[in-house]
Image: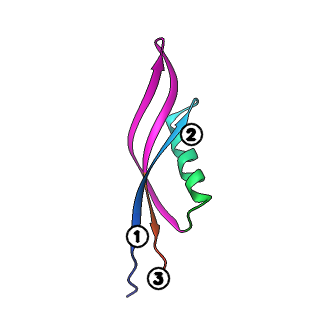
Amino acid sequence: MTENVYKFIELVGTSAVSWEDAAKKAVETAGKSLTGLRVAEITKLDMTVEDGDVKDYRARVSVSFKLED
């Protein structure tokens, strides 16, 4: 059996469009500098409000990736 070690990091993505877009942007941006991304889990959703209107959607995402030997 192969033994692997994974690291988890937390990201926060923002979007003026949707929570889904915010989460997607967070993972895709991390993927540009991290290799071996494995699993992404949305852990929290919130939004910023300005003058009673939603300004930005925010998604907190926990991402794991495999550490190289």
Indicate the amino acid at tag 1. Answer: Tyr
- State how many labels appear: 3
Query: What amino acid does circle 2 point to?
Result: Asp
Give the prevailing secondary structure in the magenta stretch.
Answer: strand
Task: Compute the Cα span from label 1 to label 3.
Answer: 11 Å
Location of residue 10 with respect to 13 vertically, above or below: below
Q: Position of residue 61 (x, y in %)?
A: 43, 48
- Secondary structure found at label 3: loop
Judging by the rendered image, the residue that carries numbered circle 3 is 69
From what the image shows, is residue 15 above or below residue 40? above
Front-lying residue, 17 or 34: 34
In the displayed orientation, state which residue is furthest to the bottom: 1
Give the residue type at disc 3: Asp
Please name the residue shown 54% across and 52% down the image. 27
The answer to whether residue 1 is left or right of residue 25 is: left
Q: Residues within 10 Å of mark 1 (few under 14, many from 20)?
A: few
Q: Secondary structure at mark 2?
A: helix
Magenta stretch: give its range: 36-61
Residue topped by disc 2: 21
Q: Residue at x 56, y 67 (%)?
A: 35
Front position among marks 1 and 3: 3
- Judging from the image, what secondary structure is the residue with disc 1 in? strand
Cα separation, mark 2 vs mark 3, equals 33 Å
Screen quadrant of the N terminus: bottom left
Residue displayed at 51% across by 44% down: 23
Above or below, 15 against 10 in this view is above
